[in-house]
């Protein structure tokens, strides 16, 4: 699972194996160790009690939660992303994106478990 942060946008990208695991458990987590005892973790969680995608940050961990029904629809269809927004400080909005990760068209070492890239398919037809 890849985490990208740009301004007030959080983006998670999951490959096929990660989407499969998420469909079974409703939870995925990654941890980055900066130094012994200094970590940052981020995760994706499916909950039936959540009404819209939301991000929670506490104790060095970022948790992105999505409604279970929305997650099921995304997992079982060709839908590429789940998108949500939540209010932030000073009137700013935090955009949350959860996406299926496509194979990079120009990478010499593409993730073999990434989803087929629709741009790559259309250029070879």
Image (cartoon, grey):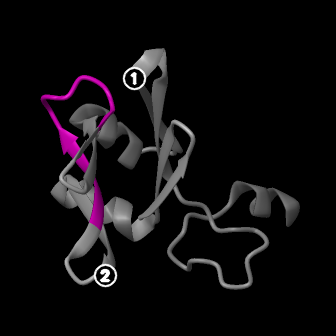
User: Where residue 79 sits: x, y (%)?
Assistant: 50, 41
Look at the numbered disc 1 and give the secondary structure of its residue.
helix
Instruction: Specify few, some or many for label 2: CA neighbours under 10 Å numbering under 14, 14-19, or 20 or more.
Output: few
- Which SS type dominates the magenta stretch? strand
Residue at point 28%, 37% (across, down) = 66
Q: Residue furthest top?
A: 91
State left or right for residue 17 relative to residue 25. Answer: right
User: Where residue 42 sits: x, y (%)?
Assistant: 30, 58
The residue that mark 1 highlights is 89
State left or right for residue 72 relative to residue 16. Answer: left
Please state the extent of the stretch shown in magenta in the rendering: 40-55
Residue 28 visible in the snapshot: yes
Please say if 45 is above or below 41: above
Q: Which of 37 and 116 is in front in this view?
A: 37
Q: Are marks 2 and 1 in contact (CB under 8 Å)?
A: no
Which quarter of the rendered picture does the N terminus lie within?
A: bottom left
Residue at point 44%, 18% (across, down) = 90
In the rendered image, residue 99 lying in the magenta stretch gets the answer no
Residue at point 14%, 33% (across, down) = 48
Q: Which of 13 and 21 is in front in this view?
A: 13
The residue that mark 2 highlights is 35
Q: Nearer the viewer, residue 2 or 36?
A: 36
State left or right for residue 119 relative to residue 41. Answer: right
Q: How far apart are marks 2 and 1 (CA)?
A: 30 Å
Residue 64 picture quarter? top left
């Amino acid at each position: 699972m890849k985490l990208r942060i740009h301004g007030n946008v959080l983006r998670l990208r999951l490959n096929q194996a990660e989407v499969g695991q998420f469909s079974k458990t409703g939870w995925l987590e990654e941890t980055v160790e900066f130094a012994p005892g200094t970590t940052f973790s981020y995760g994706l969680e499916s909950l039936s009690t959540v009404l819209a995608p939301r991000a929670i940050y506490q104790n060095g961990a970022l948790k992105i939660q999505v409604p279970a029904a929305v997650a099921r629809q995304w997992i079982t269809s060709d839908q590429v992303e789940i998108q949500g927004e939540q209010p932030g400080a000073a009137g700013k909005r935090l955009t949350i994106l959860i996406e299926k990760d496509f194979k990079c068209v120009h990478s010499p070492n593409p993730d073999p478990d990434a989803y087929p890239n629709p741009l790559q398919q259309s250029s070879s037809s």
